[in-house]
Amino acid sequence: MSDDSELLFVQGDLAATLGNSKAKAVEEVASLDRNYLLKVSEQDLIDSLTAKYQVQPIELERESIVADGPRDVDITHRGEMAFEYDQEEVTIRGTALTIIVPFHGDPMLLRLRPSTFNFNPPRGRIIGQELHLEFRGQDLKGEQLKREYERVLADVEQYVSWQRGTVDAHNQSMRATITQAVTQRKAKLKKDMDLVASLGIPVRRREIPDTFVAPQVRRKPKIELPKVAAGPYKPEPVLADEHYEFILKVIQNMTLVMERSPTAFAKMEEEHLRHHFLVPLNGHFEGDATGETFNYHGKTDILIRHKGRNVFIAECKIWHGDKAFTATIDQLLGYTSWRDTKTAIILFNRNRDFSAVLAKIAQLVKAHPNHKRELPIEGETCFRHVLHHRDDKNRELILTVLAFDVPSQKPEEAGA
């Protein structure tokens, strides 16, 4: 091997280095500006920090190995060969050949010692995403050289396999660590805000930067944390999850009545169908201590308003195809202006192929430019997704689509 190659897997302890990385992730969460942390999309922030602090394991690209050389080099000998020339050191002209092994993963790992190791680690030079193995000699032979570099590659892969368990465990636990740090700090910040609010006196405002940008991470593409608008965080009215689920349950129960008595609703238009939901909803929520009641605005909305803002909106729509359904999503986005708003689309199918309609719903929501992620929900005719506001990716809303088959004809006429 070349005299200027380095010993691999000996320059630091892998477990300790990854542990320090986890501690730095928690420290970064603690250092984030309070207004930024309260305003940013929590899931987007967790995704960004997880990508930053996870470590990509090493994978050698054996199929892409290439050779550089041969080339003439001066080879310095000491010891027995030098003594043959009656000198302590002798330089002889020889040949060098470099085997270049591309790899995926964090180059840092090629320098860190796993918990399992031996006392004869391989040598090489790490240049970017390549491992350079240089071989020198006065009389290099092909078969001998091939055996030598295969032995070195096998040693590298052995160390990589010893690292894998520690790296995988680090990556699997990193998201949970960051999630816990973010949720705990947000909870504390909100508790602190409640403390200040209870004093009944104004708070001095501080200047804050427009955005927060994460520093460039060594050996990784530049990762930026999600951006938020400037200004202090203001608490927003949020519909509790249990109330949201209860509202949807009331809607589902009313729609089951429609499915079981199709002739009573067969000729009703969207606006008339909507009125049948307002009665049971207001029966449950009218007179609530918060003063939140159901009413409607415009042509098809069912909504809850709090201090002039919509915190729940539902749209009753008859299925009229892909474009009309996408337009309904756009309509909901046009109504919402507060993060974490809960929304719903109550979709009535009056076509014969209900299965085809169900197959399209999730695809159309995921194809929407404001779609962020899908959420689990029970039921073959229920779909739930997270979307972001038209002008701000940090303002998220939950969209639940409840699809129902309400024929437009009497049962005996449906098969005609």
Image (cartoon, grey):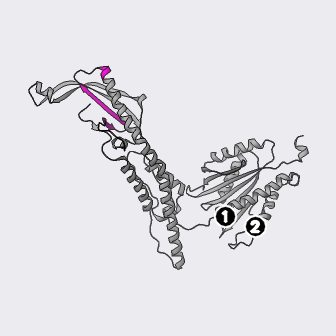
Left or right: residue 28 versus residue 256 is left
Q: Residue at label 1? A: 310
Choose top left, top right, bottom left or bottom right for residue 116: top left
Res 129 visible? no
Name the residue nearer the viewer: 308 or 220: 220
Left or right: residue 132 versus residue 376 is left
Name the residue nearer the viewer: 275 or 123: 123
Q: Quadrant of the N terminus?
A: top left
Q: In the rendered structure, which amino acid carries the disc numbered 2?
A: His
Residue 183 sits above or below residue 62 on the image: below
Name the residue nearer the viewer: 178 or 100: 178
Q: Which residue: 31% across, 26% down?
A: 148
Q: Which residue: 19% across, 28% down?
A: 75
Residue 106 sits above or below residue 197 on the image: above
Left or right: residue 347 versus residue 159 is right
Mark 2 vs mark 1, foreground winner is 2
Element on which disc 1 rests: strand
Residue 15 sits above or below residue 87 on the image: below
Judged from this view, the residue extending furthest toward the bottom is 200
Give the magenta part as a residue range: 119-144
Mark 2–mark 1 contact, CB under 8 Å? no
Left or right: residue 210 versus residue 75 is right
Res 22 visible? yes
Q: In the rendered structure, which amino acid carries the disc numbered 1?
A: Asn
Judged from this view, the residue extending furthest toward the left is 86
Measured Cα–Cα span from mark 2 to mark 1: 19 Å
Q: Residue at label 2? A: 284
Q: Which residue: 41% across, 59% down?
A: 27
- Give residue 271's position: percent from left, percent from top: 80, 58
- Give residue 84's position: percent from left, percent from top: 11, 24
**Mark 1 Cα shell of 10 Å, populated few (<14), some (14-19), many (≥20):** many
